[in-house]
Amino acid sequence: MSQDGTDSSDVIDLETSLGYLLKEAASALRAAMEAVLRPLGMTMTHYSCLELLAQRPGLSNSELARGAFVTRQSMNVLLQALERDGFVTRATEAPVGKALPTRLTASGRASLELASAAVRGVEVRMLDGLSGEQQVAARGRCAAWCAHSAAPPTTRPARSEDALPFDRY
């Protein structure tokens, strides 16, 4: 027990908390990406939308919103601006249901090409100092963390010696 009567085992040390460190890394990455995208007239959401459409042409507003981690309303506002500025086209009628598929225009692809190069530069700086093997391991570990975080809670090893070390993932 700590001096204030709380169980000290329940207190998270921010210096060693993996969740806090991941949030700090995500914030730093986002800030660095926003900084390189700003001169191109883009935000992270703008870039994410174009990147998603390049990789998955015809996504709907809802699918784009989920992929860019924003609300459907926010994505709709962005899509209207992107369409107005000539970066995307949207069908006037839904081929099935209510979803209007969206596609990049040539202008959208050209803009994305510049943004992707800028964002890739940020990622390269982030991975600087890691060997190719360490980069693969880091990507695999991040993917596993995402999958485990989304899964329902299960029984985890109680002791650290029962857990697998980082480099085994």
Image (cartoon, rainbow, N blue to C red):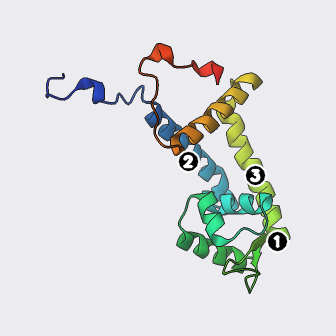
Circle 2 residue: 31
Using the image, tell me which numbered label, if any, was put on residue 105. Answer: 1
Residue type highlighted by circle 1: Thr
The x and y percentages for residue 85 are: 72, 76
**Residue designated by label 3:** 116
User: Between residues 30 and 140, which one lies in front from this camera angle?
Assistant: 140
Of helix, strand and loop, which one carries label 1? loop
Residue 131 visible here = no
Q: Position of residue 21 (x, y in %)?
A: 48, 33
Q: Is 141 positioned to the left or the right of 103 in the image?
A: left
Quadrant in which the C terminus appears? top right
- Tell me if I can see residue 128 in this picture: yes
Q: In the displayed image of the protein, which residue is found farthest to the front?
A: 155
Name the residue type under label 3. Ser
Front tag of 2 and 1: 1
Point out the tag, 2 or 1, that comes first from the N-terminus: 2
The answer to whether the residues at label 1 and label 3 have Cβ atoms under 8 Å apart is no
What is the C-alpha distance between the residues marked 1 and 3?
16 Å
Furthest residue to the right?
106
Q: Counting other residues with Cα less than 10 Å from the Cα at mark 1, is it few (<14), some (14-19), or many (20 or more)?
A: some
Figure quadrant of the N terminus: top left
Q: Nearer the viewer, residue 50 or 121?
A: 50
Q: For residue 125, what is the image quadrant?
A: top right
Q: Which comes before the other along the chain, label 1 or label 3?
A: 1
> Is there a contact, CB below 8 Å, between mark 2 and mark 1?
no
Which residue is found at the position 68% from the left and 77% from the top? 99
Q: Residue at x 52, y 41 (%)?
A: 149
Q: CA distance from mark 3 to mark 2?
A: 16 Å
Q: Residues within 10 Å of mark 3 (few under 14, many from 20)?
A: some
Q: Quadrant of residue 77?
A: bottom right
The image shows residue 88 at horizontal and vertical percentages of 76, 73
Identified by mark 2, the residue type is Ala
